[in-house]
Image: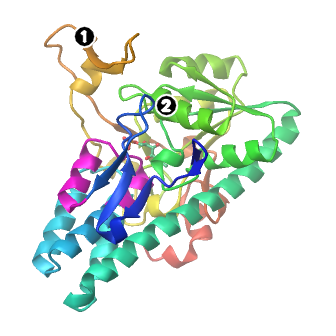
Amino acid sequence: MKVQGRAWRTIEAAQGGAAVAIIDQTRLPFRFEVLTLRTADEVARAISTMQVRGAPLIGAAGAWGLALAARADASTAALESAARALIATRPTAINLRRVVEDTLRLTLAAPSEARAEAARRAAQAVCDDEVDRSRRIGEHGHALLRKLQAEKQGRLDVLTHCNAGWLATVDYGTALAPLYLAHDAGLPLHVWVDETRPRNQGASLTAWELGQHGVPHTLIVDNAGGLLMRQRKVDACIVGTDRVTVNGDVCNKVGTYLKALAAFDNDVPFYVAAPESSIDWTMTKGDQVPIEERAAEEVTHLTGVDAEGLLRTVRVTPEGTGVSNPGFDVTPARLVTGLITERGVCPASRDGLTGLFPERRGG
Ligand code: MRU
């Protein structure tokens, strides 16, 4: 992704591997600020506060957290403790747990004097793999969009929820990767961007990155999608995912399920872009996914810039209002038209998934 003419990844090694550089997503779209993180604790904090966010990106950040921990203390006890702390930051996206556990295993397999380098190489490989997965999801999704556009013979209107773009991954995105490739190839398209309360990832992040790339888009409130679908103004929905279970259920940002219901009722195809790193081969159905409950302030307060360009946070509810803030929901497989993976598009089902990933037949 290019920002102000320079190609960026959302996470990159810094200072020869002694640190990692991230883009502070809590400051976007108002400020583009790069933060340098030097310890596993700093990485864990950045994940908890959502300075880095999005399932593939928090996985990559977790791997870098472990690599920084290994530089400080490569003992088994220290690494296991750092891994536990990183995994505990956010429970819903499977990427974080999977990547940290894999990185820990690879690191512990090396002799102690080689562990820091083994962890650094593992973290870099996680990032490179994730970029490759996203690019291939983009190619498969682009082919799908081409087909839909050929049937429509006009501008394709695609709705997306939350941010499953470049900012949520290491590069390209998952749900947005097909849109970038299609746009670059000249396919006429337009994106309806759900604002995605409470944290407004759509309004702040998706709108920003689509704008940076020049993809035509319109921001809508979360409640408008149903109307637009009834009015035949949406040709397809594409969202990302934090965890797909073996039966094809999809856990994603809260509000996704309501969009899937509206899409189903209006015969609008509903696709989920899902890298293999977001598939939980050990979990049989979506109701088992732990749903993160986040702070009440995310609902009671809003942050933006005032007329002077100053960043301000204001309360929008009566003081003391009781709040529930589940961060994710589960869309049953029956509402999902297909999963766009790095190996192609498949039905959201055990057979569909294992058809593309036969090596996972045994779990
Ligand atoms: O709470 P967030 O912003 O980390 O949630 C992000 C999402 O729900 C994304 O849709 C999901 O991680 C897929 S990202 C490619």
Q: Is 222 one of the magenta-colored residues?
A: no
Q: Which residue is mark 1?
A: 317
Q: Residue at x 80, y 35 (%)?
A: 188
Q: Is residue 335 above or below residue 17?
A: above
Q: Residue at x 67, y 48 (%)?
A: 178
- Coloring applied to the structure: rainbow
Ligand number 1: quarter of image: top left
Residue 1 in view (yes/no) = no
Q: Is residue 219 above or below residue 137?
A: above
Q: Is 52 one of the magenta-colored residues?
A: yes
Q: Dot 2, crowdedness within 10 Å: few (<14), some or many (≥20)? A: many
| SS under mark 2 | helix
Please give the range of residues in magenta: 38-61
Q: Which mark is residue 202?
A: 2
Left/right of residue 346 with respect to residue 32 in the rendered view: right
Residue type highlighted by circle 2: Gly
Left/right of residue 314 with respect to residue 271 in the rendered view: left
**Going by the picture, which residue comes out furthest to the top?**
318
Magenta segment main secondary structure: helix
The image quadrant where one finds the C terminus is: bottom left
Are discs 2 and 1 less than 8 Å apart at CB? no
Viewer-proximal residue, 98 or 314?
314
Viewer-proximal residue, 231 or 218?
218
Q: Position of residue 89 (x, y in %)?
A: 23, 51
Q: Position of residue 135 (x, y in %)?
A: 63, 59
Residue type highlighted by circle 1: Thr
**Going by the picture, which residue comes out furthest to the bottom?**
111
Q: Residue at x 82, y 42 (%)?
A: 186
Q: Is residue 323 above or below residue 246?
A: above
Viewer-proximal residue, 142 or 251?
142
